[in-house]
């Protein structure tokens, strides 16, 4: 865990003044840190009966796809509007910096699916809560959520109650 922690850097005043951004891209460029992060994100869910991993655009794609591969299940991307070619379900939600929309293929999940939602960071929980709602709109069950970093004090964990949350690091 020290290797992962040492690779996360602080970027002050990004994306706007007063925000201290936790940049995980150095973890991605270090193959040992990335391998360790994926193993630790996956570990609680091995043999957990999951059928899919869902990841949000964009960094959730990276960690989600690698966790899905590790767990031997499929990966479902949640995309920005207009990026998916088939029929989609959408959800609009508020962010700490504005608003956004996520889309998923309408046939990506069904009532037989138990899903792990993966992203790099949990802050206010807006994107994760919208992701849960979108997964459940397709009839699937959210088994848990996994994040590499949780920013405490921003209300994300509380917003996601009663879902089970796994995180590697907290700041």
Image: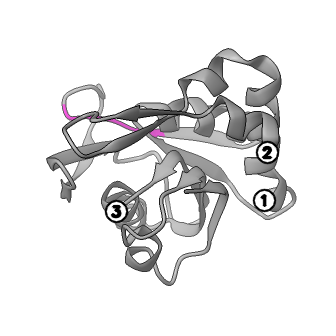
Element assignment for label 3: loop
Dot 2 surroundings within 10 Å: few (below 14), some, or many (20 or more)?
many
Judging by the rendered image, the residue that carries numbered circle 3 is 124
**Residue 45's disc number:** 1
Q: Residue at x 65, y 27 (%)?
A: 27
The magenta segment: 77-81
Q: Earlier in the sequence, mark 3 or mark 1?
A: 1
Q: Secondary structure at mark 2?
A: helix
Q: Secondary structure at mark 1?
A: helix
From this viewpoint, which residue is outermost toward the left?
98
What is the tally of numbered marks visible in this picture? 3
CA gap between label 3 and label 2 equals 27 Å
Vertical order, 122 against 60 (above or below): below
Residue to which mark 2 is pinned: 71
Which is more toward the observer, 2 or 38? 2
Q: Residue at x 21, y 55 (%)?
A: 96
Above-or-below relation of 38 to 143: above
* 20 inside magenta stretch: no
Residue visible at 60% across and 34% down in the picture:
8
Picture quarter containing residue 143? bottom right
Side of 139 relative to 50 (left or right): left
Q: Nearer the viewer, mark 3 or mark 1?
A: 3
Does the residue at mark 3 contact the one at mark 2 (Cβ under 8 Å)? no
The one nearer the camera, 28 or 132, is 28
Quadrant (top left/top right/bottom left/bottom right) for the C terminus = bottom right
Q: Residues within 10 Å of mark 3 (few under 14, many from 20)?
A: many
For marks 2 and 1, give the CA distance: 8 Å
Distance from Cα at disc 3 to Cα at disc 1: 24 Å
């Amino acid at each position: 865990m020290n290797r992962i922690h040492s690779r996360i850097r602080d970027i002050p005043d990004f994306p706007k003044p007063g925000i201290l951004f936790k940049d995980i891209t150095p973890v991605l460029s270090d193959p040992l840190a990335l391998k360790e992060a994926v193993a630790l994100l996956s570990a609680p869910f091995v043999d957990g009966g999951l059928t899919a991993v869902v990841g949000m655009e964009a960094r959730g794609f990276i960690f989600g796809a690698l966790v899905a591969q590790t767990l031997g299940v499929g990966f479902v991307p949640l995309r920005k509007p207009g990026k998916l070619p088939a029929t989609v379900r959408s959800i609009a939600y508020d962010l700490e910096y504005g608003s956004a929309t996520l889309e998923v293929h309408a046939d990506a999940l069904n009532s037989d699916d138990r899903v792990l939602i993966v992203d790099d960071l949990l802050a206010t929980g807006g994107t994760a809560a919208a992701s849960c709602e979108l997964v459940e709109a397709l009839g699937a069950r959210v088994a848990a959520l996994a994040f590499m970093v949780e920013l405490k004090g921003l209300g994300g964990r509380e917003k996601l109650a009663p879902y089970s949350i796994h995180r590697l690091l907290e700041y």
